[in-house]
Amino acid sequence: MGQVPQTIYGIIGDGRVATHFKHYFTLLDLPVRTWSRRAAKSDPRQLPEQLQYCDTILVLIQDAAIVPFIQEHPFLKTRTLVHFSGSLTTPLAFGVHPLMSFGPSLYDLVTYRRIPFVCDFGFRFQEVFPGLENPVFEIKPELKPLYHSLCVMSGNFTVLLWQKMFAELETTFDIPREAAVPYLSRIASNLIEDSRGALTGPLQRRDSETIERNLEALESDPFHRVYRSFVDAYRETTGGHA
Ligand SMILES: NC(=O)c1ccc[n+]([C@@H]2O[C@H](COP(=O)([O-])OP(=O)(O)OC[C@H]3O[C@@H](n4cnc5c(N)ncnc54)[C@H](OP(=O)(O)O)[C@@H]3O)[C@@H](O)[C@H]2O)c1
C-alpha cells in the first residue's frame, strides 16, 4: 500500500502569527513553505512558484489586506485558503480564528496544542488540518463580530489596564512592577477556577462611596472614563447599585 501524500501547508506573511504557526507546524513535523513580501525582495521567485506544492495556504497577513491580496493573486484561488482574522468573513477564504494571544516569544508544543480554533460554520477542520488535534468550535458568520469584540475586550483591554497599573506603580509610587505580579496571578487563577465568584472590590461590595473616591482620584486621567464606563456597564448588566 502506498502512503497517503502529506499535505504541504503554505504560510503567507511573516508577522507574529505567521512566525508562531510556522514554528508550531515545524514542531509537529508538518511540511510548510512560506512567502512574505519582505522575503520576496531578496528571493526573485514569485508566489505561485514558491507555494506551488501547497494544497492549503494560510493567509496570515493584516486583516484589511487579506481580501485585496487574494484578489491580486489568481493562483491562490486554486488552493484551499484559510485566514485567521477573528472579525473578517469572506467567501474567498475560510475563517479559522486561534483563540490565543501571540506575543513576541514563541511557545512550546503543549501551549500550541491547547489553542482552540473558532471556525466559520461548516468548515471541515479535520479534513484540512488532519495533523492538528486542537479543540475546534464553529460560529455563525453573523455572530463573528460579537465574538471578536469579546476577545478584544477580555484579552486586549485587560492588557491596557495592566500596562497602566505597572507604569503607575513604577513612575508614581516607585514600586517595582514585580510587586503586583502575585495580584495578577491570583486574579487569573480565581477567574479560571470560579469566574462567577472572582470579582472582589467596591463594585462587588456595592460600595458607592469608595467608587466615588476612586473616580475623584482619577479626575484628570483618561482612565477616569474607563472606570466610569465599567461602573455603568456593571450596574446595567447586574441591575445593581454598585
Ligand atoms: N496577534 C495575535 O495575537 C492574533 C491572534 C489571533 C488572530 N490574529 C490574526 O492573525 C493575522 C496576522 O496577524 P499578526 O498579529 O501576525 O499581524 P502582524 O504581526 O502585524 O503581521 C502582519 C503581516 O501582514 C503582512 N502584510 C500586511 N499587509 C500586506 C500586504 N498588503 N501584502 C502582503 N503582506 C502584508 C505584513 O508584512 P510587512 O511586514 O511587509 O508589512 C506582516 O507579515 C491577522 O488576521 C490577525 O487578525 C492575530
Image: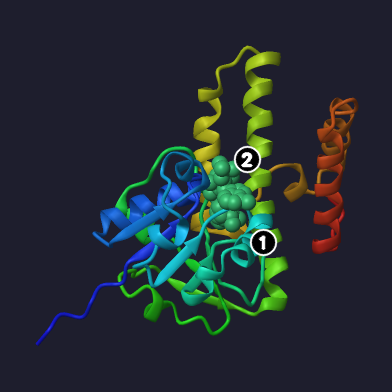
Residue that mark 1 sits on: 68
Above or below: residue 121 compared with residue 195: below
Above or below: residue 88 compared with residue 197: below
- At x 37%, y 65%, the residue is 9
How many numbered tags mark residues here?
2
- At x 45%, y 66%, the residue is 57
Q: Earlier in the sequence, mark 2 or mark 1?
A: 1
Q: Nearer the viewer, residue 150 or 121?
A: 121
| Image quadrant assignment for residue 161 | top right
Q: Nearer the viewer, residue 24 or 240?
A: 24
Residue 186 showing in the rendered view: yes
Residue that mark 2 sits on: 159
Q: Rounded to the nearest whole Å, what is the CA distance between mark 2 and mark 1? A: 31 Å
Q: Secondary structure at mark 1?
A: helix
Q: Is mark 1 within 8 Å of ligand 1?
A: yes
| Image quadrant assignment for residue 138 | bottom right
Instruction: For the residues labelled 2 and 1, say whether their Cβ atoms are less than 8 Å apart.
Output: no
Please tell me how crowded label 2 is: few (under 14), some (14-19), or many (20+) other residues with Cα within 10 Å. few
- Residue 48 on image: x %, y %: 44, 63
Name the amino acid, label 1. Pro
Position of residue 160 in the picture relative to residue 6 (left or right): right
- At x 59%, y 65%, the residue is 70
